[in-house]
Amino acid sequence: MISLCISAVVLAHAVAGFSPSVKGTPEILGLAQDPSINRDSCGSTRFGNRAFWTCRDSQPFDTNGTPTLPIYSSSASWTDFGSDGTPELVEIDSAHGVGLLMYGENNEQPFYPMASDECSSNTAGGCDDGSRYAIWPDSPPLITTTNSDGSIVAYTWIRQEHILGLTLINDESATTLYRVDYDGSSSSALPTVTLVKENFFTADQFPYGHYGGVVANGYAYIYGQNSDYVVAVARVPVGQVEDASAYEFYQNSQWVSTHPAVDADGISISASAGGQGTYYYSEAWERYVWIGQPALNVAAQFYITTSAAPEGPWDSSVQFYTGVDGNYTLGAYSLQAHPGLLANSSQNAIYLSYTKNDLDAANVNVYTTPLIYLEWE
Ligand SMILES: *[C@@H]1O[C@H](CO)[C@@H](O)[C@H](O)[C@H]1NC(C)=O
Ligand SMILES: *[C@@H]1O[C@H](CO)[C@@H](O)[C@H](O)[C@H]1NC(C)=O
């Protein structure tokens, strides 16, 4: 009887202290790359039998392979899978070698359109006074509906960051809701994007959604982060994403219907290491997972934390992988996990990427997206 009790206690501890550990040496697969586009900060999700990627600032390469104008504030692309269900690695071109070929019709236009008061007369959101509306996705679209014909509805929440250089002019930003509609076709055309509502969340409300999300139990759980690096979560039934009154917010350990202020107490859930990353649900672990970067860090140092429920409690984050930084001062950022690249939900592994930022011989920033495959014990 006594020994039974002891083993039950030990088991409870083992579950609470779930700690992922890496099996063997992670494999660097090459770059995720469109040969004609220099693109910053890419993330992906699974759209049918392809992966769908969204990125921030994108620009064409000139004939010498140097990034040139115009800059457009977001782009999107497809990548393919091979017959074994793993991401298809091909020779991209002589400059980029073997990797995951990104393709799609961007036409040098922002994938996420800017509103008319966001200096939208140019594709970068640049204003006459030298400031900029940086309409940059922090996360790939969150899929809320997949229909039997293969069509998909997904959503992206983007903060209206108004910047001068890389400094925010407004401490907090309103959040725009975008809807992404994919018709299920296999063409290189991109899905349709609609700006649902510019100030879906106002600047004085906590900015849920941009920081990532996961769908579970009929809800979209969406995470946000304010300028003090507080992470909080809201949820909305998957069919009611466009109805701001249908959202509930996790505050003081319960779901409430009043939208917390951007600096509200009782909403922090410490569900990350503080920087950019990815939330997903791991079938293999039966746990919610966040993988990404610590706050104010610009190195390819990947951290992980997991939880039994989307709202937590989340474990302390731990570092599990280090990639090669770029040689620019902001050498590595936008660390991402890519659960949509896995062949199936029982594969106990994850794909990782980050933006490696290098200065080329002409002192121009070149962004690349190294893709890493890592197995867990
Ligand atoms: C899942 O994918 C892995 C990797 O391709 C493969 O080895 C495994 O057999 C697949 N499992 C199922 C149940 O399809
Ligand atoms: C930085 O890295 C890029 C890409 O590898 C390379 O072309 C460039 O020469 C490097 N610059 C310095 C100063 O090392």
Image: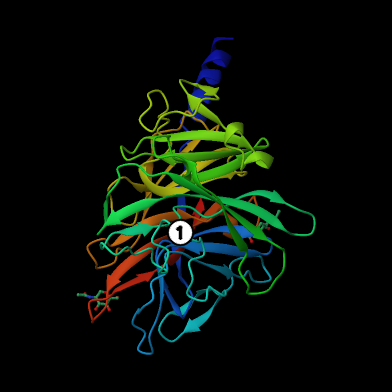
Q: Rate crowding at label 1 as few (under 14), some (14 to 19) or many (20 or more) other CA atoms within 10 Å.
A: few
- Residue occupying the far top of the picture: 1
Residue sitting at x 69%, y 49% = 145
> Which residue was labeled with disc 1?
116
Against 373, residue 309 (above or below) is above
Q: In the rendered view, does 176 fall on the left or right side of 52?
A: left
Where is residue 211 drawn, in percent x and y?
45, 45
Secondary structure of residue under mark 1: loop
Q: In the rendered view, does 6 fall on the left or right side of 38?
A: right
Where is residue 175 drawn, in percent x and y?
46, 45
Where is residue 369 drawn, in percent x and y?
42, 67
Q: Quadrant of ligand 2?
A: bottom left
Q: In the rendered view, does 202 fall on the left or right side of 186?
A: left
Judge whether residue 377 can be spotted in this image.
no
Of the pair 117 and 251, the residue shown nearer to us: 117
Residue sitting at x 53%, y 40% = 222
Q: Is the CB–ligand 2 distance for label 1 below 8 Å?
A: no
- Residue occupying the far right of the picture: 148
Of the pair 127 and 108, the residue shown nearer to us: 127
Judge whether residue 213 can be spotted in this image.
yes
